[in-house]
Amino acid sequence: MGEKSEQKKQFILECAKKVFTEKGYKDVTMKDIVEACGISRGGLYLYYGSTKEIFMDILNREMQETDDIFSDSISEET
């Protein structure tokens, strides 16, 4: 995936994260995320097929960031 695509994906995830925080996982629709991002429905579906897929990507990235911070912390101590 190109850098622009990754930037767009990151933008979508940041917007979606806000929507999930406000409405809760069960109440979020793809339309909510489209509106929050200001992109077309088709534009969103180029990257994600469902709210579950978006939510899981957010969680996976958060876990990766936490793992990276934890690993860096351990490396600095040894």
Image (cartoon, rainbow, N blue to C red):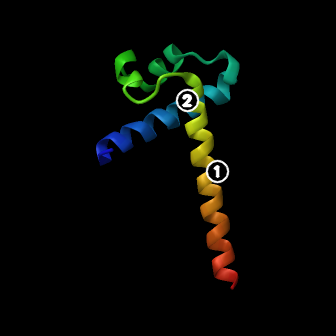
Dot 1 corresponds to which residue?
63
As drawn, the residue found furthest toward the bottom would be: 78
Q: Is residue 58 above or below residue 35?
A: below
Residue sitting at x 70%, y 82%: 77
Which of 75/23 is in front? Answer: 75
Q: Marks 1 and 2, Cα distance to the nearest angstrom?
A: 15 Å
Dot 2 corresponds to which residue?
53
Residue sitting at x 60%, y 44%: 60
Mark 2 burial class by Cα count in 10 Å: few <14, some 14-19, many 20+ = few
Q: Is residue 66 above or below residue 30?
A: below
Mark 1 burial class by Cα count in 10 Å: few <14, some 14-19, many 20+ = few
Label 2 is placed on what type of residue? Glu
* Residue 41 point in image, percent of width and height: 39, 16
73 left or right, relative to 46: right
Q: Quadrant of residue 26?
A: top right
4 left or right, relative to 28: left
Quadrant of the snapshot with the N terminus: top left
* Residue 63 point in image, percent of width and height: 64, 50
* Residue 44 point in image, percent of width and height: 41, 24
73 left or right, relative to 48: right
18 left or right, relative to 4: right
Quadrant of the snapshot with the C terminus: bottom right
Label 1 is placed on what type of residue? Met
Query: Helix or strand or loop: what does disc 2 sit on?
Result: helix
Which of 58/15 is in front? Answer: 58
Query: Helix or strand or loop: what does disc 1 sit on?
Result: helix
Q: Quadrant of residue 46?
A: top left
* Residue 76 point in image, percent of width and height: 64, 81
